[in-house]
Image (cartoon, rainbow, N blue to C red):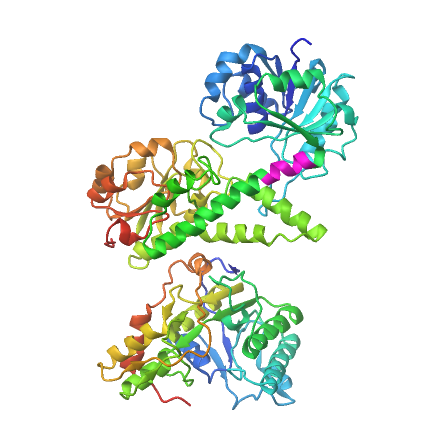
Amino acid sequence: MTRPTVGFAGLTHLGLVSSIAAAAQGFAVIGYDADTTRVRGIVAGKLPVVEPGLDELAHVHGARLRITDRSAELAACDIVYIATDVPTDDRGQSDLKGIAELIERVTPVLGPAALLVVLCQVPPGFTRALAFPKARLFYQVETLVFGRAVERALKPERFIVGMADPAAALPPSLAAFLGAFGCPILPMRYESAELAKISINCCLVASVTVANTLAELSERVGADWSEIAPALKLDRRIGAYSYLAPGLGIAGGNLERDLATVLRIAGETGAEASLIEAFLRNSRHRRDWALHALHDAVLARKPDAAIGVLGLAYKENTHSTKNSPSLALIEALAPWRVKVFDPVVPASAAAGGHVAGAASAYEAARDADALAIMTPWPEFRALDPARLARVMAGRVLLDPFRVLDEAAAKAAGLDYLTLGAPPAATGALTHA
Amino acid sequence: MLEHTLPEAKVPSRVVIVGAGGFVGGAVRRNLEARGVPTLALTRAEIDLLAPDAAAKLAPLLRPTDSVLFVSALAPTRTAAMLVDNLRMAAAVAQALATQPVAHLVYISSDAVYADDANPVTERSCCQPSSLHGVMHLAREVVLRTTLKLPLAILRPTLLYGARDPHNGYGPNRFLRLAAKGEAIALFGEGEEMRDHVAIDDVAALVCAVLDRRSIGVLNIATGRSVSFRAIAEKAVALAGGGASVRGTPRQNPVTHRHFDIADCLKAFPSFHYLPLEDGMRRAAEQGMEPAR
């Protein structure tokens, strides 16, 4: 068949990246969102999300990408993806109202042969329950990674496609579209595909939790997790790309959503899922690493301490602050003066009268008794530890993600604290 | 997790201490009185909570604007009879508070409510007591939580120590007393067990902070730093001038440990910092350990 026209309904993070990637693959794409302001911004070249390479990609392939706030334009599509982000509440529970409304709005305008593909994170059973002809209804696992979304959208590892009859061939339009990406396509029943997405995230959380658990042990027994992790990655049973970097708990919203979904389903069905609760406990525990470290190193001794915080986003290369460890830390530092800097997220994201924004990383560090690098933004790697030491009032540097060179920081006279290694292993702690 | 219902600390109009004659109640009373907070200190002499008319006598003493600290208990609870008596005492207090509601209720529970293997213990750890003492406190918590509609804070202290502690439990109190007399400190096994010990002054300070913010919810009272009993014994000997000795004994029970993650306390009271064990034991030694009763 001729190249299908592909539509994406919902131009938040997932839909926007997916539609631009589809255009980049040479397909005619129609991106729809009911939010007129959002649509105007995208048309004007002001993308509402931050992703490395996304602006350039949109600029280069924009001619094949039509952005509209009129759902009727989706009638021209052979395939329409429901691609809006699904928000979660504080407990990680999905709010499916938005996606249900979007589907209700979109399906009446689709052509009689058009395919509907749900790309959002939905719980098992959601797709099959939709009132849409099952032969034209599909669920596709999205594997968007904040900060690496473009790379993953252009070169997916595989497509996981949920369908009513996995033994049947994919419709030609969908086969043509997915086949253009040159990766394996795995058809399966709807529920399997929906659970596959959750399974992927549970495996990632399991790896991170193992890393966090053993990193904490490393801190307490004089080991250094950064020496151990590379050895594990050379083990084929573990893998070179395994998530073994220790972190400050699970954040961003999507992993938390899937853990909450597993717990909910386990509760409803009686399945044993205490492992998931252990993941969440460990996540909560490690989230407070920086808070404990600051109290131990500075706050217990200096009631008028000033703290600098670099990074507000929950991870690098994103504007998202969902469940950000940095914001949680700042909130818990209310009695102290806190100066913050993030390359993308405004200081106003950190609420509280004790918080002041800084124009640069060095300004955030100026006169600080302790500096915490809470988001591993690439540009923080260029910071000069000696210059930081000169502008800071104290010596304590929290660098959980090892953004700066440890030896250089110590040479600059800073007390370097990081995840996975005890303070003793990184030099004696001298309190400010 | 503790939640403050008052945005800023405000001295309570009056604090009624039910159990003011005990180790914790006395320490809180001294702290409150030193700050000029009006208190009504009730001991067994004023109201015997096991008496049939306990609730009837307590209720008229309460005012709607009072904060009540319920700290009276027969402790440690070692027998079924003590368990029943402790529950009767809680029932009397609950009945009085149902008759005359107050502005705030603070209950001093215990970390004995948690499962023995809940490490590190947080306020969300599983409550699965293995001792009658833990069962008693958990049952009292449930009585107060389910039968009263009052702003309620439940505080769960771990092992306490201080010069005035009438108990002589295995740990800093007993070790300081033995060391002061130059007597040998016998450890269970080699004293490998790690435990968290809190100075009584810190307990009083946190209770007062909870009263001042009219906080509700659950908060553990623990320093977040566990130390082996051997290290505590050796510290006690050193504080006494080194005349005493520390010796191990054949181990009768498996080694268990207890650690706390005190992030909730750091968030609830960021400016509060616990006295390090060494400083607290030194303070107790300097004050002179009173004889155990």
Res A357 → quadrant: top left
Q: Can residue A169 be seen here?
A: yes
Picture layout, residue B126 above or below residue A18: below
Q: Can residue A332 be seen here?
A: no
Q: Residue at x 57, y 15 (%)?
A: A23
Q: Is residue B250 left or right of residue A430?
A: right
The front one of B34 and A59 is: A59
Picture layout, residue A258 above or below residue B149: above
Q: Is residue A140 left or right of residue B78?
A: right
Query: For residue B52: magenta?
Result: no
- Residue B30: x percent and y percent? 40, 79
Residue extent of the magenta highlight = A192-199
- Residue B70: x percent and y percent? 53, 77
Picture layout, residue A331 above or below residue A114: below
Res A316 → quadrant: top left
- Residue A279: x percent and y percent? 53, 50
Query: For residue A194: magenta?
Result: yes
The front one of A37 and B133 is: B133
